[in-house]
Image (spheres, rainbow, N blue to C red):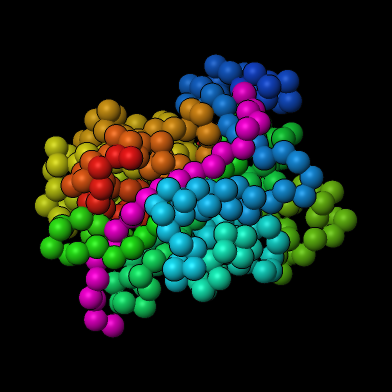
Amino acid sequence: MKTINRAAIAGVSGYVPDDVLTNSALQEMVNTNDEWITTRTGIQERRILKGEGLGTSVMAIQAVKDLLQKTETDPETVDLLICATITPDMITPATANIIAHAVGATRAFSYDLQAACSGFLYGLDTAAQFIASGRAKKVVVVGADKMSSITNYADRATCILFGDGAGAVLVTTHPPESGCGIVDSICKTDGIGQNFLYQKAGGSKLPASHETVAANAHYIYQDGQTVFKAAVTAMSEVVIEMMARHKLTPADITYLVPHQANQRILKLVADRVAIPMEKVMLNIHKYGNTTAATIPLCLWDYEQKLKKGDKLIVTVFGGGFTWGAMYIVWGYDGL
Ligand code: UT7
């Protein structure tokens, strides 16, 4: 299909629950300590969505409502809403359908997209294609995960990492001559990752049963060291590939926006691509790993500092394995 439009982010918003889970609170739950968590991951606290019957959509709805309000967007003008999540409210309907209904996006079609920690970047790339082809003029992409719903708080290897949150962006058309917008994306997948990062039960292969619950098979499992190494290699390579494609030097980049999985991973990636840490967006210390929400939550946190023309490289890595990079020239001055 012929490319006729350039997609650009026109606004960003986020939502994190009020309840804070600190490292010292985790110390009371499992055999760990603040020093280990801080030095090995950079995480100091994370937010947890508490309350009976509250799913991922609760956070996503808040983020999208705020986004539509701040960008003065009539919900009925939204053409498409994509929700990236691995913790949908339920298997069906899609959480995106629930969000679209709640925010009054009655004209939009909507669906969920599952690519673990890469879900938001995949969703943003999809939105950019719908805009480029002319099929859509306004797309909302929301990355949201209630990781506390699949985290085993008796497993110190994983429970220290994850938090809950949601972030959303509005993607619209932008005049290509401005040079701003989503310039390029690279998305990659290697199914070998199924062996190292997964939630075993609850799908069609191993439906929920007394046995799966007793075996803790509905919680997320990770071979941390394997994922760590794969994440550093994959994110570095794809950032270097993106910079080479567009003849970008580290000095040209305003911000590297990496998936917030572990501060040590971010430092290693930044070193390998020769981008100084002052140019790396960071919020892992306060939210932990919120899976599909980390990238939009970073953009939300840094939005006020961003200026039109700033050059951003987003990079992600997650379960699957899935990974990728996106080159964005920011389209507006910080709000
Ligand atoms: O978002 C999707 C992608 N995810 C990631 O990119 C995460 C990648 N992995 C990681 O971030 C790290 O591998 C972890 C933070 C998960 C683990 O850090 P690590 O430096 O790889 O630790 P390790 O698994 O090699 O464990 C080192 C030691 C072990 O003890 P021994 O065998 O040396 O006695 C663990 O049992 O640390 C122990 N350990 C802990 N100790 C205190 C593991 N978890 C903890 C803990 N507190 N929470």
Looking at the rendering, in which quadrant would you find the N terminus?
A: bottom left
**17 within the magenta span:** yes
Q: Where is residue 323? Give x, y as percent.
A: 40, 55
Stretch in magenta: 1-22
Total of numbered circles in the picture? 0
Residue drawn at the location 64% of the way across and 18% of the way down: 24
Q: Closest to the observer: 235 or 176?
A: 176
Q: Where is residue 271? Give x, y as percent.
A: 27, 33
Q: Where is residue 246? Give x, y as percent.
A: 15, 55
Q: Where is residue 173? Give x, y as percent.
A: 29, 65
Tell me if 134 is positioned left or right of 106 in this view: left
Judged from this view, the residue extending furthest toward the right is 210
Residue drawn at the location 48% of the way across and 21% of the way down: 39
Residue drawn at the location 76% of the way across and 41% of the way down: 51
Q: Closest to the observer: 214 or 170?
A: 170
Residue 37 can be seen in this image: yes
User: Can you tell which quarter of the image residue 156 is in?
Assistant: top right
Residue drawn at the location 61% of the way across and 22% of the way down: 23
Tell me if 264 is positioned left or right of 240 in this view: right
Q: Quadrant of ligand 1?
A: top right
Q: Closest to the observer: 128 or 238?
A: 128
**268 within the magenta span:** no
Residue 197 can be seen in this image: no
Tell me if 326 is positioned left or right of 298 in this view: left
